[in-house]
Image: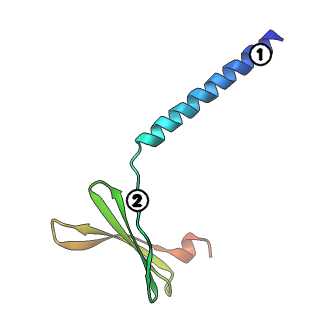
Amino acid sequence: MKDKQNITIILLLVTAAILATMLVVTLNSPRAYAGSPVRGGDYIMVNGAFNENRDLVWVIDVMSKRMNVYELNLQRGAVDLIDGVELGKALGQ
């Protein structure tokens, strides 16, 4: 009877330690913040902060089912295309 109680206590302590570690790691990880989406015609645009120094804009073309991610490059005074995704392929359609 005592051995089962000891094993249960050890398992609960290990689980609590794992959950506490996950909580600390999650609270210290960088976060991405998104703004409100704006729809204009066939496009949906959402801006958001990737980190303190990097802002991104996601543009979804509804007709072509494509999403592009853009970043403002202040050094060159331009908007750079970061990546593009075919939504139909990404969502398995």
Q: Residue at x 21, y 73 (%)?
A: 78
Q: CA distance from mark 2 to mark 1?
A: 45 Å
Name the N-terminal-most of marks 2 and 1: 1
Quadrant (top left, top right, bottom left, bottom right) of the N terminus: top right
Q: The C terminus is located in which quarter?
A: bottom right
The residue lying at 73 percent from left, 18 percent from top is 7
Residue appearing at x 31%, y 63% in the figure: 55
Judged from the image, the secondary structure of the residue bearing numbered disc 2 is strand
Disc 2 crowd, CA 10 A, few/some/many (<14, 14-19, 20+): few
Which of the 4 quarters of the picture holds residue 60?
A: bottom left
Label number found at residue 5: 1
Residue, disc 2: 33
Furthest residue to the top? Answer: 2
Total labels: the figure holds 2
Decide if residue 26 is on the left or right side of residue 93: left
- Give me the disc on residue 61: none
